[in-house]
Amino acid sequence: MEADFSGWATKAGLKCADGRVIMRGAFEHMDGKQVPLVWQHAHGNPQNVLGHALLEARDEGVYAYAFFNNTPQGQHSKDLVQHGDVNHLSIYANNLVEKEKNVIHGVIREVSLVLAGANPGAVIEHVRIAHSDGDITELEDDVIIHTGLDIEFKADDDNLEHADDADDADDDEDLTVQDVYDSMTEEQQNVLHYMIGVALEEAAKENKSAQHSNQPVKGDLIHKEGADTQMSRNVFDQTDSKNGAVKKHVLSHADVKGIVSDAMQCGSLKQAVEGYALKHGITDIDVLFPDAKMATGVIELDKRRTEWVSSVLSGTRKTPFSRIKTFVADLTQDEARAKGYIKGNYKLEEWIGVTKRTTAPTTVYKKQKLDRDDMLDITDFDIVAFLKAEMRLMTEEEIARSILIGDGRSALDEDKIKDPLGASDGTGIRSILNDHELFVTTLNVNVDDSNSSYEEVVDAVMDGMEFYKGTGTPTFYTNRRELNKFLKARDTTGRRYYSNKAEVADALGVKDIVLVEPMNTMTDLVGIIVNLDDYNVGTDRGGELTMFDDFDIDYNQQKYLLETRLSGALVRPKSALVIKKTDSESVLATPTAPTFNKSTGVVTIPTVTGVVYKGADGTTTLSAGAQTAIAAGATTTVYAVAASGYHFANNAEDQWSFKRDDA
């Protein structure tokens, strides 16, 4: 079914009269939605519903394909559109969200035919600001947004096509002089009017001169055969005839006719005039035509996708203090269990291992400067607003990256955001990827060999959830490359296991999958499973993300500083799973727990292929067999590490603590 007409429902990057800008993607979620087509937004009366419109989200905005119903009102409106009496659209929207004067989200409720649109450029009417704190503002009232752009309608014998297809078809049609004139900008039309005006003035002078000399009139611009058709003056003549200089160029009526003919063929008066200029040596002809203008009104950014940043920053818990202290009591040991009592026996105290760590804040900043001359000369857009938005965007991305995987810089780089890397205490933002195994369980999967499938990752996560002790249902953070490997997985018949992202999330037991582009640099990382409510971001009063600006009169520069002082760390043990890939030649090994005699204090190390046991210092290798007895009441810890060429399924069960009974 072909649409009756189409047009832009709203355009991205257009600055509104009140200073707001409709951002690219503000209505992208409306793609494919059907909304009512209404007359003049009079939706209070059902008779004013003329049909419906299908919305198509494009990079430039939202395009609407409209279909009239068979009611008298619908058919009458169709006649108005096809006759050209009504040629503008506007939208009725609500639930608008803005950030720093940029409208970033909204819901289109209807598309309306309107008698008169605004000047080209978006206009928002009837807006009331609910609250404005310089961050994100919700516009409570419903709004009407006009673009002022003409609609396209379907003739009875034509099919309505997309704008790009229509443009291609127009190239093959013969253009009339009226078509060429209508295609001109206002400045180009003014130049043409001026040229014709000069020709009329010269003709009038010649007529007047002929009348005074009693000579026959040459003609009122009626070009008789054999008459002199050359103008005595034209706007392309770069010399003054009064000073006796020889005229370099004369634009005759034949030249004008040739220019118009060329314009009809190429579809552009500018190209036709430039072609004439090249033939006749006229220089700087471009001053007669307007300069190029920005298509969207905003600077397009070549950047990483940053939709995931808000998910990370909004998901973490916040505290008004930046020094975070965490105590963890290990209740998994047998000595921590409750004990039965036999009359007359001595009651033994329980043994609980307690671990403490502290995280202190670090400073994250971004600094920029602008020469005041540049600020005044740049008029196409608000360079200060752009600069501030860029600083906030990049700073928030860096903080979110540090929370998940660290900032990726070398430890020797002075610009590195500090990461304590799992130490018992330290300064900075503790990345989940590199955190201590008390808080993070690492799952190792071998999926790079020819016989492997990403179903092995699903199996590993299902088994690893045994060790997940975080809050609620977690989220899986990964990148597009790894997600595609799940989506491309097929069974023996060639059928895909998962048809979409939601099915992958369901198989992994997570509530959502968030794509993090910076993870592309981590070739051995499949993803991170965590509920960020277990991650604490602390900031003291005054340390929140703040913009500072100052003017340097010595160098005539405006300087800007965006800075925050904060700390970050997981505060719940075993609250995250990190899935990593092992080398394709690596072999899976399973460590066996040492045996311990509590009365004698002797630990016996087993012999397991691919497993190396370490002493309490984490470095001394323990040989197989009985070890030296520990003192009465003392404790010791044994660690297991994978030998070269081997890997463990996880690191949740690679250490054991033992305590000998008191004497």
Image (cartoon, rainbow, N blue to C red):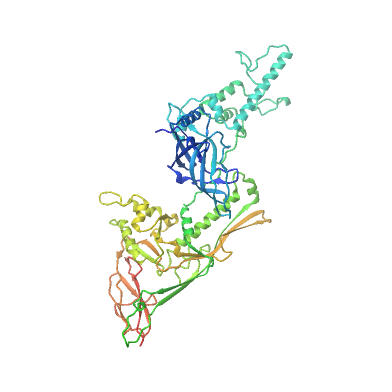
Q: In this view, does 566 lie to the left or right of 620?
A: right
Query: Which residue shows up at 74% across the image and 14% down it?
Result: 212
Q: Name the spot of residue 117 as percent of width and height, x first.
A: 56, 36
Q: Name the spot of residue 472 as percent of width and height, x first.
A: 40, 62
In the depicted structure, whether residue 590 falls above or below residue 104: below
In the depicted structure, whether residue 259 falls above or below residue 586: above
Q: Is residue 57 or residue 492 the one in the foreground?
A: 57
Q: Name the spot of residue 272 as percent of width and height, x first.
A: 55, 28
Q: In which quarter of the image is the N terminus?
A: top left
Residue furthest to the left = 493
In the depicted structure, whether residue 24 falls above or below residue 598: above
Q: Is residue 380 or residue 321 the one in the foreground?
A: 321
Q: In which quarter of the image is residue 135?
A: bottom right
Q: Is residue 457 or residue 20 the one in the foreground?
A: 20
Q: In this view, does 352 lie to the left or right of 456?
A: right
Query: Which residue shows up at 54% across the image and 44% down it?
Result: 143
Q: Quadrant of the C terminus?
A: bottom left
Q: Is residue 54 visible?
A: yes
Q: In which quarter of the image is residue 351?
A: bottom left
